[in-house]
Amino acid sequence: MSRDEPDYSASAREQNRRAWDALVGRQQRFTRPASDQYVADSSAIIAHDSWLPGGVAGRRVLCLASGGGRQSAFYASAGATVTVVDVSPEMLSLDRQVAAERGLNIRAVETSMEDLSAFATAEFDVVIQPVSTCYVPNVARVYREVSRVIAPGGIYISQHKQPGSLQADVQPSPRGYELQEPYYRSGPLPPVVGSLHREEGTAEFLHRWEELLGELCRAGFVIEDLMEPPHADPAAAAGSFGHRSCYVAPYVRIKARRLATSRSGHGTASALWVPE
């Protein structure tokens, strides 16, 4: 965000809180808690994940902007001490429900991913953040907050919507999925209805690669790995999620480690990610 650009944080936070509360009421696909089998298999899944060496048992895990009863239940079932943060009280109600039903110890805290002042410096060993940075105008603020609350040498695993996916049309033209939104833009993206690539009613922002990767490094992290989760399906119908993914990858997943000393002067870090 430039000096002359308005700060959309407060308005976006309120819009996204209301939107996700409403999506819970409609049982949207990302508001469905983890299945019994998924939770039961958590330790085995993590054991085969090269990004989570040694598993998470006994480790302090922050599930950031990831309410909904999925991420928190997955890591708590694998033996982690879990805190889940979300801006939506209805999403967090699903985490509390899952914790009560399964006898899991999960701390749920309602706050924005841009404001982790409720937590102490180096309070967490691992931070897991599913797709969510698109809901804030300034990703650097999020990275700085994570940098402070994560312990030195810790792992931060985050997933993001790729900028190209947020630029591209959802329906193909004769020449493919053409770019509709500028790469260098200010303010939230236009609203959508019925999209499989964005969430209806939310305020979303396009973050450039310089922001997604560069700001992460400037916050005191070193990037250890990066992958694009595969969603392409050449046999899928034109206009479908799988067909569009053949042309533009929807997501990127990043594994970063908090350096012992930060150029930005903020805390220390550690993080983990949940398989889909």
Image (tube, rainbow, N blue to C red):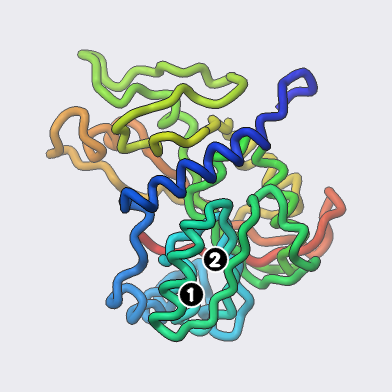
Placement of 44 over or under 264, stated as above or below: below
**CB under 8 Å between discs 1 and 2:** yes
Q: Which residue is mark 2?
A: 272
Inspect the image, locate mark 2, and give the three-letter code of the amino acid beneath it.
Leu
Could you classify mark 1 by the number of other residues whose Cα lies within 10 Å: few (under 14), some (14-19), or many (20 or more)? many
Total numbered labels placed on residues in the image: 2
Residue at (55% x, 31% y) in the render = 205
State which tag comes first along the sequence, 1 or 2: 1
Placement of 175 over or under 157, stated as above or below: above
Q: Which residue is mark 1?
A: 75
Side of 145 relative to 106 (left or right): right
Asked whether residue 54 appears in the rendered view, the answer is: no
Question: Residue 174: image x %, image y %?
Answer: 20, 13
Residue at (67% x, 36% y) in the render = 9
Inspect the image, locate mark 1, and give the three-letter code of the amino acid beneath it.
Tyr
261 or 105, which lies in front?
Answer: 105
